[in-house]
Each structure stands twice: as structure tokens, then as C-alpha cells.
Amino acid sequence: MAHQTVGHGPLADCPQSELVPPGPEPRCPVDITLAALAGRWTPLVLREFLLRGEATYSELSAALPTLSDKVLSERLAQLTRAGIIDRHREAGWPPRVRYVLTGEGRELAPVLRSMWDWGAARRDG
């Protein structure tokens, strides 16, 4: 069975070999992006990094007050594993950890901007 986008719309020029159903290792570029942004809060955590460039756990927690500590910790670990943010431990006492957006993370800015624009058009209209 062919992927629904084959031959129609803006993805019509994508190679058939890349338009495969999700599997253990995503091959479709859309699936790869979704895997990096997986989880309800992940795009909002990423939004904070795009606004700030870097942040501490406390800054992120304050910016997203309805996000539980457990989920924030999970999302930071996920984004670190995906290479979207880096974790830097600063010397001193008490120890501080700063999370910094990577180059790959900055490349997601247009994706989040498109999500913002799409949502804003529906919120205001």
C-alpha cells in the first residue's frame, strides 16, 4: 500500500523509498522529525530554547509551570539524546547544569515557527 502523500500535494516529489510506514528506525524524513519532537511537551520545551538559546532547569520549570518535574526531566534527556540540546555542568557549589541548544536544535526553528504560525491563524481566526 502506498503512502497517502505519494503523487499528491507538496510531498509528491519525495522518493518512494523515503515514504515508508514508521518502524523501529524511522526512514521517512517526517517520521525522523516527529521522533525528535515526540511527546506532548517536547515542542514547548524546544520553544523555550529557541527563545533563550540556553536555560537552566529552574528557568525552564518557571517558564512551563504546568509541566511536571518528571516530564521536564524526561524531555530534557530525550532532547539531549537526539542531539538537539547539550547538557553542561558548571563548576562550583551548588552544582549548576545549563542546557544549550545545538546547531541541529537551531535548525528546528523554521519547524517551530511554522507550527506557531499555523496555530496562531486558527487561534485568532
Image (spheres, rainbow, N blue to C red):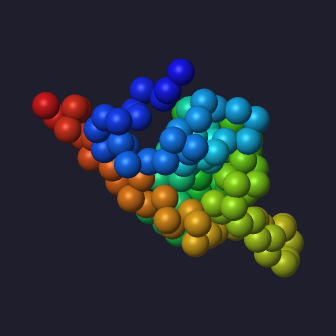
Q: In this view, does 44 lie to the left or right of 55?
A: left
Label count reads: 0
Can residue 67 be seen? no
At horizontal 67% and vertical 42% (from top left) the residue drawn is 26
Residue closer to the observer: 99 or 105: 105
The residue lying furthest to the bottom in this view is 91
Q: In this view, does 111 lie to the left or right of 22?
A: left
Relative to 99, residue 90 above or below: below
At horizontal 27% and vertical 46% (from top left) the residue drawn is 117
Can residue 89 be seen? yes
Relative to 35, residue 66 above or below: above
Q: Is residue 85 left or right of residue 111?
A: right
The residue lying furthest to the left in this view is 125
Residue closer to the observer: 90 or 82: 82
**Residue 125 point in image, percent of width and height:** 13, 31
At horizontal 59% and vertical 35% (from top left) the residue drawn is 20
Residue 105's quadrant in the figure?
Answer: bottom right
At horizontal 49% and vertical 26% (from top left) the residue drawn is 2
**Residue 39 point in image, percent of width and height:** 61, 34
Q: In this view, does 63 lie to the left or right of 36?
A: left
**Residue 27 point in image, percent of width and height:** 64, 45
**Residue 76 point in image, percent of width and height:** 70, 50
